Image (cartoon, grey):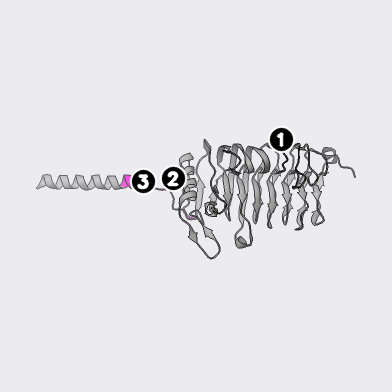
Amino acid sequence: MHLKKIIKTKTICLCLGFFAYVSAYSQPFGGGSGTQQDPYLISNKLDWQELADSVHTRGDIATAIQTNNWSYGKYFELTADITAPITFSIGKIFLSWDTDKRFQGYLDGKGFEIVLNLESAGSSDMYGALFAHTLACTIINLTVSGYVTGYTYVAGVVASNSNGSTYSQHRTLIKNVVSNVTVEGRRDTYIGGIVAVIGNATIENCINNGFLSVIEPTGFYSCRIGGIAGNVGGTTIISNSINLGSIYCGIANMHALGPGGNIGGIIGTGSNAALINNINYGFLRNINTGPKGGIGGIAGGCPFALATTISNNFNSGVVIGNGNVGCIVGNAGTNTVLENNHYDKQMCGEED
């Protein structure tokens, strides 16, 4: 009788140990439940891969506003640097209607760093960045380093952030983010140190240190490159951000019918946006702006019907180009509002 009791006790202990092992093994990420009070914890490349897989494969949640994927409303937090290079983007859109793949969560980097090594698989692989596509997300307190190269939408942090009246109740926030990423575009490209294309968003206190460039020796293409964002629209506000990185567009045969080569220390092109209290120290060069392009210390071109306000910005970077060259804006449309901006005339060749 005593022996049976011992065997029974050992069996119960073994079962409890097994279930504890299964529970620990199946725990998502490095811990957490995904709430604001208890975010999912991400400490290594495997955790980051789990986030990517979850965004790409888990089911949608239909709402009255939009279709959201698994990441909608969930919170994530880094607990360590991820130095094993990340070779994949989160929020990849594989088809034009595959919109449920956008990252829609809250990521707090806690000041930690993620290292990238991303190279586009080909011209059909359009989105290259830490996050390929986002919508109504929050990304804060993060440093990104490494190398990214690709076609069309290429950046250090976000390749494309969705915009539109459908999502007007939800704004993306990118704050306290530093990019040390070398970003190289190929062919007709939007490039940004932080984001390539963004709308309906707020960008605050961000810094780009990375070298941004696009080189295409043949064909007729355009480049839109900004130290913070390549193309900005949809009531986006960029404030208190700094570009320290050099920017270069080496496209010789600029497309005559396109927007041309628009390069700016903060944004490449802008429409219905506001740039406030930003600084450019970076070296900017465009070998051919094209007939509709421009190069400017703060913005390359804002020639669109919707107004862009550029106020209280400062440029101390060298600006070299042909065509529309400006210390603040290269190609300013009639709806561009310029207020209280300052620059070093010796750096960009303007006279009083």
Q: CA distance from mark 3 to mark 1?
A: 55 Å
Instruction: Tell me which numbered mark, 2 or 1, is placed earlier along the sequence.
Output: 2
The crowding category of the residue bearing disc 2, from other C-alpha atoms within 10 Å (few below 14, some 14 to 19, many at least 20), is some
Residue type pointed to by label 1: Thr
Contact between labelled residues 2 and 3, with CB atoms less than 8 Å apart: no
Residue type pointed to by label 3: Ala
Q: In what quadrant of the picture does the C terminus appear?
A: top right
Q: Give the foreground label among 2 and 1.
A: 1
Contact between labelled residues 1 and 3, with CB atoms less than 8 Å apart: no
Q: Is residue 48 left or right of residue 200?
A: left
Kindly tell me whether residue 46 is visible in this rendering.
Answer: yes
Q: Which residues are magenta?
A: 20-37
Where on the picture, by quarter, is residue 325?
top right
Residue 233 location (% of width, % of height): 69, 54
Q: CA distance from mark 2 to mark 1?
A: 48 Å
Q: Which residue is mark 3?
A: 24
The crowding category of the residue bearing disc 3, from other C-alpha atoms within 10 Å (few below 14, some 14 to 19, many at least 20), is few
Kindly tell me whether residue 44 is visible in this rendering.
Answer: no
Badge 3 marks a residue whose secondary structure is: helix
Instruction: Tell me which numbered mark, 3 or 1, is placed earlier along the sequence.
Output: 3
Q: Is residue 219 left or right of residue 9?
A: right
Q: Which residue is mark 2?
A: 30
Instruction: Tell me which numbered mark, 3 or 2, is placed earlier along the sequence.
Output: 3
Residue 102 location (% of width, % of height): 55, 52
Residue 201: assigned label = none
Q: Residue furthest right?
A: 352
Q: Which residue is mark 1?
A: 218
